[in-house]
Amino acid sequence: MRIRIVDAFTDQPFSGNPAGVLLLDSFPDDTWLQRVAAEVNLSETAFAHPLPAGGEADWALRWFTPTTEVDMCGHATLATAHVLHSTGRMRGPVRFAARCGVLGAAPESDGTITMDFPTSSLIPLPVPHGLEKALGAEILTVHDTADHIGDLVVELRDEAAVRGLAPDFGALRDLSTRGVIATAAAEHPDRGYDFVSRGFFPAVGIDEDPVTGSAHTALAPYWSARFGRDDLVGLQGGSRTGIVRTRLRGERTLLNGHAVTVIEGDLHA
């Protein structure tokens, strides 16, 4: 079967967030899916198969980190939609049935893909004991997110603080359900983005995820409330970065970005 590595939320190879993508006829057992994801060893590998016509979705979609299955993943959904459209398996919008509900992905005339995800809730919390020490930075606010995400959104004082983070991943592992998203307003908005973020997920086997689409379903309402605008641009990442364009639409958040296939080959398993 064909396996592809796609860099998501970028139009340049070797940047953004890489995801494995396998298009199947049906899902094999979970053990096989997990072993493939461990072999690919990226933050997520997406597995998809077509569904019968006439239902609420066109394809079934699942995502696995090297150690576990996750409920929601933005960059691997973008990567899967890119593969479907670039190979001619789908034309126009596609609907994915996933553990977090039905997700949409539609190609745009500029070559990007716009995804339709549920907007996350944001619940303010006191700063958890040990979180500032684990991150190595002063924290301004902390918010918990929806069940399918399970991240803590943590605002730091400025962009430089986010860029300079060198967390204690062992200490972070026990401080959230899935991960910690550190964010701050852009120091220079004229450079084309409104806020920055970095995502750390040691609890699910990923120390740092370069560009986390699902986290932007929480970052979008957080920063939209701050800036008073529904359309924003986020820059995420440390050594690898990517751009996520967000559009808040009440209970849904639109996530837009490019994707590019960098590796394609045969899986012998």
Image: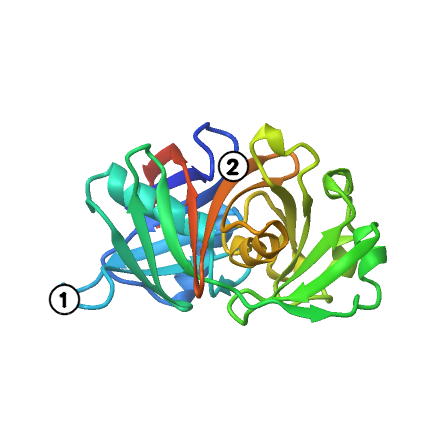
Give the x, y percent position of residue 52. Answer: 16, 65
User: Label 2's element?
Assistant: loop
Q: Quadrant of residue 127?
A: bottom right
Label 2 or label 1, whichever comes before in sequence order: 2
Q: Disc 2 residue type?
A: Gly
Mark 2 vs mark 1, CA separation in Å: 35 Å
Residue 54 is tagged as 1
Front residue of this view, candidates 234 and 230? 230
Instruction: Rate crowding at label 1 as few (under 14), some (14 to 19) or many (20 or more) other CA atoms within 10 Å.
Output: few
User: Label 1's element?
Assistant: loop
Relative vertical location of residue 118 with respect to residue 14 in this rendering, above or below: below
Give the x, y percent position of residue 180. Answer: 67, 57
Does residue 226 show up?
yes
Relative vertical location of residue 190 with respect to residue 135 in this rendering, above or below: above
Which residue is painted at 47% across and 61% down in the image? 72
Q: Disc 1 residue type?
A: Gly
Residue 16 is tagged as 2
CB within 8 Å, label 2 to label 1:
no
Which residue is painted at 76% across and 50% down in the image? 156
Give the x, y percent position of residue 164. Answer: 77, 39
Horizontal relation, residue 224 to residue 101: left or right: right
Which residue is painted at 69% across and 69% down in the image? 124
Which residue is painted at 61% across and 49% down in the image? 227
